[in-house]
Image: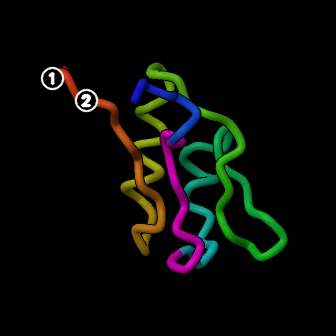
Amino acid sequence: MGDSPAATPPVTVDRDLCIGSGLCLVYAPDFFTHDDDAKAVLVAEPTAADLASVRTAVEACPTSALVLHTGSRSGA
């Protein structure tokens, strides 16, 4: 049971909740795009330096379809 950074993406998109509002594209255009169904897709994994814009995009999502996973296990 080791840590596997690729096991859980830093941000997940609930495609059932996503309505394609595009706010994630406004706040974090380097990390999100829309697919052919107009649903949000994560296109790049954010680094710690990028988390502010990604967090803003997650918080701005009107349906809470975006979830930011933080790996704070040992207290940060």
Where 35 falls versus 72 (above or below)?
Answer: below
Residues packed near mark 2 inside 10 Å, few (<14), some (14 to 19) or many (20 plus): few
Image x and y of residue 69, in percent: 38, 43
Q: In this rendering, would 24 be left or right of 61?
A: right
State the residue at coordinates (50%, 47%). 11
State the residue at coordinates (58%, 33%). 6
Residue 74 falls in image quadrant: top left
Helix, strand or loop for disc 2: loop
Q: In this rendering, would 41 be left or right of 8?
A: right
Where 28 falls versus 41 (above or below)?
Answer: above
Per the rendered image, the range of residues in magenta is: 8-17
Residue at the spot of label 1:
75
Residues packed near mark 1 inside 10 Å, few (<14), some (14 to 19) or many (20 plus): few
Image x and y of residue 52, in percent: 41, 33
Callout 1 touching callout 2 (CB < 8 Å): yes
Residue at the spot of label 2:
72
- Which label sits on residue 8? none
- Where's the C terminus, which quadrant? top left
State the residue at coordinates (39%, 30%). 1
Q: Nearer the viewer, residue 1 or 4?
A: 1
Residue lying at the far left in this picture: please name it. Answer: 75
Q: Nearer the viewer, residue 45 or 28?
A: 45
Q: What is the three-letter code of the residue carrying label 1? A: Gly
Q: Is residue 13 magenta?
A: yes
Where 11 falls versus 48 (above or below)?
Answer: below
